[in-house]
Amino acid sequence: MSGRKILIVEDENKIAEIVRAYLEKEKFGVTVADTGEKALTVLKEGFSLIILDLMLPDMSGEDICQAVRKDSDIPIIMLTAKSEEEDRIKGLGIGADDYVVKPFSPRELVARVKALLRRVKGASDVLTFNSGDLVLDSTRFESRKKDSPVVLTPTEFKLLQCLAEHPGQVFTRLQLVNVILGYDFEGYDRTIDAHIKNIRHKIEDNQKKPSYLKTVYGVGYKFTGIPDED
Ligand code: CA
């Protein structure tokens, strides 16, 4: 998982090490790059957030930010000694998500890191499985199979979303009825089978050997897709 990996791009060793210590105390994995070139190289390892100093020996923070933004929407917090309003606006304009002015409190920076990660997570709510084969976007109620839109009814979407949010967990038909209706209704549970059949028809490559929605005989259903790491 890259969900807890932070890249610090900072040439002032003392600052980098203080920030590293604070982040590691909060169980983040930390990598420090002291030049822009190193940062752009190491970035391929996959991080969940970048803390980027504006003044570096080889490149400016703005240049790095622009280079990163060409193919990534990774959250970026900029560090700078410049406090002029103009620079703030410029920094945010080129794609930084937040700005911290030096000298700063490491504790406050860590709080900003956490807040930004929470914000980003809340904004996306997109689940992807089996190396991007199946995508569920619960903010837009959309799903895609092999990059093509899949049209699910609201009920089908709700069922699939519930199962997909708990991979491997077995749900009884009655539990799934509850997901759809909001209450238990014995007479309804066989319709679950019909819904599952319809969803399988839309997302499975092989109906007889489903890779996402498996029947657990005598019990119910479980989702067996493998969540992609972010
Ligand atoms: Ca610097």
Image (spheres, rainbow, N blue to C red):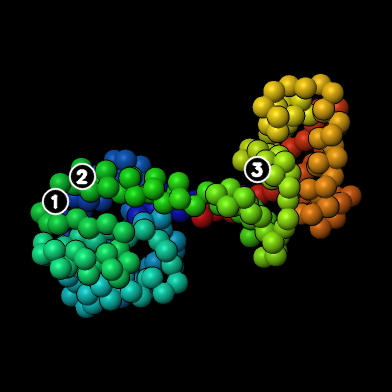
Of 143 and 204, which appears nearest the observer? 143
Query: Tag 3's secondary structure?
Result: helix
Q: Amino acid at mark 1?
A: Phe
Q: Is residue 10 left or right of residue 122?
A: left
Q: Quadrant of residue 195?
A: top right
Q: Quadrant of residue 156?
A: top right
The residues bearing labels 2 and 3 have C-alpha atoms spaced at a distance of: 36 Å
Residue closest to the far right: 208
Q: Amino acid at mark 3?
A: Gln
Q: Is residue 138 left or right of residue 15?
A: right
Query: Tag 2's secondary structure?
Result: helix
Query: Tag 1's secondary structure?
Result: loop
Q: Amino acid at mark 2?
A: Glu
Is the residue at mark 3 in contact range of ligand 1, meaning its CB lies under 8 Å from it? no
Mark 2 residue crowding within 10 angstroms, few (<14) / some (14–19) / many (20+): few
Of discs 2 and 3, which sits in the foreground? Answer: 3
Tell me which residue sits at (67%, 27%) in the image. Answer: 182
Circle 1 sits on which residue?
A: 104
Q: Which mark is residue 108?
A: 2
96 over 119 or under it: above or below = below
The residues bearing labels 2 and 1 have C-alpha atoms spaced at a distance of: 7 Å
* Residue 164, percent from left and from top: 66, 43
